[in-house]
Image (cartoon, rainbow, N blue to C red):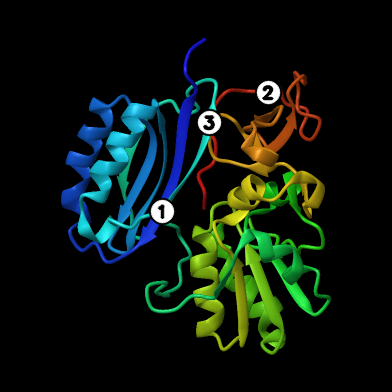
C-alpha cells in the first residue's frame, strides 16, 4: 500500500515587499519536489495549500521557513489516499485573501479562541456567531446557530458588516472560517469599524475538527475544502461527496446529475478560497 499524500495548509501575514522575487525560485523548488497545489504571494504575506510526499513536504516547508520573515509560519496537516491537486501554482496577488478593503492583520486582529474553548464561547446566548465563508460553504456544514452572511465571495463581506452588523458594535462577535485566514481580515475590519469584542476560532474549522471529539462537537455537516477531496469531516477525513461545477453545490458521490440544477456532474476547476 502506497504512503498517504500529505496536505499542508499555511498562511502568514508579514510584510513581503520583495514577493515578486520569491515567486520563481519557490515554484521551481516545489516542482523539483513533486509538489502540487497553490501558493499565493503578496506584499502582505503568503497563503497556500500544497500536497506531496512526507519527505518532499518537509523539504518545501523548510525551504519556505528559511526566510526569517516566515520562520515561525504555522501550518496544518491532513492526509489523502491520492493527490488532491492537479498542478503546482505560485501566484502573485494584491491580497493573499481578497477582502477589498484596507486592513492590516499585522497591526490588530480579534482575540484568538482555542478550539478546546470555542464551545463555551458560542454557547453564550449573547454572542453573535458569524460564518465568514461563502454561502455554498455554509450550506455544506457550519456551527450550530451560525449566521450566513449570504456572500458569494469574501469581497462581499465588508458590505455585510456595514449593512447588517453596524447596530451591534456593543455585542460579542465570534467568527470562523476554514483555516483562519479570512477571520484575520474579518476581525481586523470589525475592530477598525469600532466593534468592542471580536473573537475568532484559532486555526479555523480544520483545527476544531481535528482537535475536538465528535461527541463533543457543535459542528454540523462537512467542511468544504478547496481541493479534490471537496469536503472533510471530523478527524479531517475526506467526505463522500462530489462538486457540481455548474451551480457550486456539493452533492452525494453516487449522483450522476445535480439535484439542484439538473445538470450532469462535470469535471472542472474548483473555486478558490475567496
The image's mark for residue 12 is: none
Determine the CA span between mark 1 and mark 2.
Answer: 36 Å
Marks 3 and 1: CB-CB under 8 Å? Answer: no
Mark 2, residue position: 265
Residue 248 visible within the image: no
Mark 3, residue position: 79
Judged from the image, the secondary structure of the residue bearing numbered disc 2 is loop
Determine the CA span between mark 3 and mark 2.
Answer: 25 Å
Quarter of the view holding residue 252? top right
Q: Position of residue 274 (x, y in %)?
A: 52, 53
Residue situated in front as seen by the camera: 218 or 244: 218
Q: Earlier in the sequence, mark 3 or mark 2?
A: 3
User: Eyeballing the image, is 193 above or below 188?
Assistant: below
Judged from the image, the secondary structure of the residue bearing numbered disc 3 is strand
Residue situated in front as seen by the camera: 47 or 202: 202
- Residue at position x 21%, y 49% from top? 66
- Residue at position x 82%, y 63% from top? 145
Q: Position of residue 165 (x, y in %)?
A: 69, 79
Marks 1 and 2: CB-CB under 8 Å? Answer: no
- Residue at position x 71%, y 77% from top? 164
Mark 1, residue position: 74
Q: Which dot, 1 or 2, sits closer to the camera?
A: 1
Q: Earlier in the sequence, mark 1 or mark 2?
A: 1
Residue situated in front as seen by the camera: 188 or 53: 53
- Residue at position x 28%, y 35% from top? 59
Marks 3 and 2: CB-CB under 8 Å? Answer: no
Q: Position of residue 195 (x, y in %)?
A: 60, 86
> How many other residues sit within 10 Å of disc 1, few (<14), some (14-19) or many (≥20)?
some
Determine the CA span between mark 3 and mark 1.
Answer: 17 Å
Amino acid at each position: 500500500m502506497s504512503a498517504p499524500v500529505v496536505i499542508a495548509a499555511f498562511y502568514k501575514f508579514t510584510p513581503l515587499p520583495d514577493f515578486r522575487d520569491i515567486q520563481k525560485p519557490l515554484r521551481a523548488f516545489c516542482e523539483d519536489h513533486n509538489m502540487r497545489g497553490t501558493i499565493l504571494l503578496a506584499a502582505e504575506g503568503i497563503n497556500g495549500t500544497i500536497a506531496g510526499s512526507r519527505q518532499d513536504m518537509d523539504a518545501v516547508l523548510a525551504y519556505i521557513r528559511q526566510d526569517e520573515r516566515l520562520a515561525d509560519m504555522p501550518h496544518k496537516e491532513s492526509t489523502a489516499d491520492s493527490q488532491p491537486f492537479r498542478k503546482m501554482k505560485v501566484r502573485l496577488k494584491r491580497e493573499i485573501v481578497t477582502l477589498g478593503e484596507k486592513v492590516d492583520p499585522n497591526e490588530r486582529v480579534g482575540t484568538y479562541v482555542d478550539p478546546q474553548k470555542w464551545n463555551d464561547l458560542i454557547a453564550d446566548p449573547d454572542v453573535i456567531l458569524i460564518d465568514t465563508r461563502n454561502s455554498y460553504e455554509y450550506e455544506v456544514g457550519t456551527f450550530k446557530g451560525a449566521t450566513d452572511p449570504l456572500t458569494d465571495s469574501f469581497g462581499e463581506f465588508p458590505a455585510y458588516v456595514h449593512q447588517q452588523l453596524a447596530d451591534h458594535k456593543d455585542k460579542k462577535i465570534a467568527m470562523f472560517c476554514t483555516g483562519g485566514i479570512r477571520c484575520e481580515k474579518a476581525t481586523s475590519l470589525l475592530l477598525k469599524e469600532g466593534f468592542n469584542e471580536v473573537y475568532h476560532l484559532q486555526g479555523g474549522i480544520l483545527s476544531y475538527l481535528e482537535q475536538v471529539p465528535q461527541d463533543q462537537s457543535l459542528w454540523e455537516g462537512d467542511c468544504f475544502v478547496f481541493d479534490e477531496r471537496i469536503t472533510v469531516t471530523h478527524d479531517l477525513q475526506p467526505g463522500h461527496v462530489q462538486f457540481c461545477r455548474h451551480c457550486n453545490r456539493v452533492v452525494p458521490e453516487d449522483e450522476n446529475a445535480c439535484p439542484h440544477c439538473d445538470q450532469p456532474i462535470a469535471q472542472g476547476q474548483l473555486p478558490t478560497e475567496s
